[in-house]
Image (tube, rainbow, N blue to C red):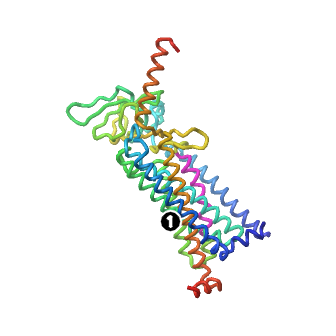
């Protein structure tokens, strides 16, 4: 088992396998995104309170879910890199950060644009919005620390520890609407209860969530391949690869 | 092998330490993390008396009275246990309506009226098409009538 993990996580092996995997994520992403957006923007009925403006949630909610999911992936890979010193895990963490930061930014901006007409303000400092903003700064901090340290192994160690420490923010974001009074509404779709959303609105939402998830898998493969090539640039197999071009 | 378990111990130790520190910190600042006070908390005197704070609750049906001359509006919010009277002058957000949640920022007058400088609408987590909302309302009404007539 240990031997198998080590073999599979060799950067070269990953580079070969991932090339075959990318289309299996990229094509469904495009299809789901088209169907999901069409369903969400044209087919789903308007909301009884918000009218048409609620449709921004088909981007906002999946983006917010992804911002949390990617952070957990990043922290877990950083932890694996730190403890078992698997180089590929560090590369996955480094490649995840900008994607996660983008989703966080997207969630904050779409929420803000929705907040102005609905709440009457672009921004409030309630627990949900503030903790999500801290998440964005955690991503930025991770990326800054990673690129501030010259030595790759030290950079991975330092930024990996930051990623792990930042994990405490994830349950805070998730439960902020339960623990404190917030302007942000509570969760609509939860694991244990029946979602308080009409089925015709729920379907496009879940389609979009799946599309975003597959998008992340496709992009993380591409970005990790880049990272592999960059870090292994002085190794023989990369040089041979370049000579073949 | 020894080194690996040392690293594992370090990572787990750091994580546990940070979790405990955060939990204690959040517990200490719990009051400040509340975005708004409920009418019951205001009644109980938990809200600050001398500087501004936020109060949140449901706008009581039939309580909204608009001034005929300017943008002034008076209404009552409730959390189904206590109520607070609110006075506000300005433009209200789209989602402001009777029976809907709102958060108002301002200070409380000696006579118990809350003078708001800002009113925000609080949306709930329910999403449904207008027809479904209408059907739900009709169903509720029917049930109430049946109960009144003793047919249920």
Quadrant placement of the C terminus of chain A: bottom right
Where does label 1 land, which residue? A140
For this rendering, which residue is in front, A204 or A155?
Answer: A204
For this rendering, which residue is in front, A26 or B48?
Answer: A26
The location of residue A234, given as percent across then percent down, is: 62, 85
In reply to whether residue A68 is colored magenta, the answer given is no
Residue at horizontal 46%, vertical 24%? B140
- Subunit under mark 1: A
For this rendering, which residue is in front, A109 or B67?
Answer: A109
- Compared to residue A1, the image places residue B123 above or below, namely above
Residue at horizontal 46%, vertical 33%? B45
The location of residue B116, given as percent across then percent down, is: 34, 38
Quadrant placement of the N terminus of chain A: bottom right
| Left or right of A194, for residue B136 | left
| Left or right of A182, for residue A13 | right
In reply to whether residue A163 is colored magenta, the answer given is yes
- Compared to residue B152, the image places residue B14 above or below, namely below
Which contiguous range is marked in magenta?
A: A157-176
Residue at horizontal 38%, vertical 39%? B104
Disc 1 crowd, CA 10 A, few/some/many (<14, 14-19, 20+):
some
Q: Can residue A76 be seen in this view?
A: yes
- Compared to residue B61, the image places residue A194 above or below, namely below
The location of residue B89, given as percent across then percent down, is: 28, 38
């Amino acid at each position: 088992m240990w031997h198998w993990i080590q073999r599979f996580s060799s950067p070269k092996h990953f580079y070969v396998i991932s090339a075959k995997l990318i289309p299996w994520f990229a094509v469904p992403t495009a299809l789901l995104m088209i169907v999901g957006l069409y369903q969400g923007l044209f087919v789903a009925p308007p909301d009884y309170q918000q009218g048409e403006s609620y449709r921004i949630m088909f981007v906002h909610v999946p983006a917010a879910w992804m911002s949390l999911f990617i952070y957990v992936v990043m922290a877990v890979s950083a932890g694996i890199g730190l403890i078992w010193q698997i180089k590929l895990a560090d590369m996955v963490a480094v490649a995840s950060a900008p994607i996660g930061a983008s989703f966080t930014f997207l969630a904050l901006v779409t929420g803000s644009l929705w907040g102005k007409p609905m709440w009457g303000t672009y921004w409030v400092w309630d627990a949900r919005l503030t903790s999500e903003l801290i998440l964005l700064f955690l991503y930025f901090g991770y990326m800054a620390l990673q690129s501030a340290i010259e030595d790759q192994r030290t950079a991975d160690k330092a930024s990996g520890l930051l990623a792990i420490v930042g994990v405490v923010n994830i349950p805070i974001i998730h439960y902020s609407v339960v623990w404190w009074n917030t302007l942000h509404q509570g969760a609509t779709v939860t694991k244990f209860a029946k979602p308080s959303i009409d089925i015709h609105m729920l379907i496009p939402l879940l389609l979009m969530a799946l599309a975003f998830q597959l998008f992340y898998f496709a992009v993380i493969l591409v970005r990790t391949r880049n990272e592999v090539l960059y870090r292994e640039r002085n190794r023989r197999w990369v040089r041979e690869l370049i000579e073949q071009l | 092998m020894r080194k690996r378990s040392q690293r594992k111990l370090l990572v787990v130790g750091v994580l546990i330490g940070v979790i405990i520190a955060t939990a204690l910190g959040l517990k200490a600042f719990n009051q400040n993390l509340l975005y708004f006070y409920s009418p019951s908390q205001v009644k109980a005197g938990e809200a600050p008396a001398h500087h501004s704070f936020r109060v949140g609750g449901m706008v009581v049906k039939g309580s909204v009275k608009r001034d005929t001359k300017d943008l002034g509006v008076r209404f009552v919010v409730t959390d189904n246990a206590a109520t607070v009277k609110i006075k506000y002058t300005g433009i209200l957000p789209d989602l402001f309506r009777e029976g809907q949640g709102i958060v108002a920022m301002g200070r409380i007058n000696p006579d118990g009226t809350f003078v708001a400088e800002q009113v925000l609408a609080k949306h709930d987590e329910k999403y449904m098409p207008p027809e479904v909302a209408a059907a739900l309302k009709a169903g509720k009404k029917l049930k109430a009538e049946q109960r009144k007539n003793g047919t249920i």
